Amino acid sequence: MSFDSIVKMLRKFVLCEQYSFVDRLANATSKEVVEAALYEALRASRVSGEICEGVTPYIANEDEIKELLEVLDRDLNEGLDLAKKIAIKALSIPVRREGSKE
């Protein structure tokens, strides 16, 4: 699984220079830290009309969230590595596809 919808959700906050969610995922040392960061990012995405001027929130796919949590349950180190990779991707500049607005 690519976890693209989680990356997309977090990237919206990065675009608004709100780095706390990606920083917490990148530096997480426990499952609880990852869960709290994801919960808060999802919660913030649901309440915001706009995260900042011109940037609307995006809510990650439930299946991807579920898969990440299952990886954390199965193998903590693998899950923490995955959370870090998701955070790194969220900070990167996405490749634009022709005709895409994102």
Image: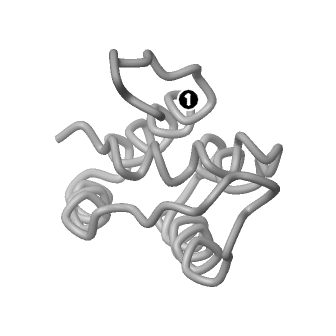
Looking at the picture, tell me which residue is in the foreground, 30 or 92.
Answer: 92
On the image, the x and y values in percent for residue 48 come to 67, 76
Task: State the image coordinates of residue 46 (x, y, percent, origin top left).
Answer: 55, 80
Near-viewer residue (89 or 75) = 89
Residue drawn at the location 35% of the way across and 53% of the way down: 76
Does residue 69 appear left or right of residue 35 in this picture?
Answer: left
**Residue 94 in the image, given as x and y percentages of width and height:** 49, 22
**Residue found at the far front of this picture:** 99
x then y, percent, for residue 95: 44, 16
Residue nearest the observer in this picture, 55 or 7 = 55
Image vertical order of residue 35 relative to residue 96, above or below:
below
Residue type at numbered disc 1? Ile
Q: Quadrant of residue 96?
A: top left
Q: What residue is rendered at 58% in x and 63% in y?
A: 57
Vertical position of residue 66 compared to residue 68: above or below: below
The colour scheme used to paint the residues is: one colour
Residue at the image position 80 percent from the left and 51 percent from the top: 18
Name above or below for residue 30 compared with residue 42.
Answer: above
Badge 1 is on which residue?
Answer: 88
* In this picture, residue 82 sits left or right of residue 8: left
Residue occupying the point 52% across, 73% down: 42
Residue at disc 1, secondary structure: helix
Count of numbered circles in the view: 1
Identify the image quadrant of the N terminus.
Answer: top left
Q: Residues within 10 Å of mark 1 (few under 14, many from 20)?
A: some
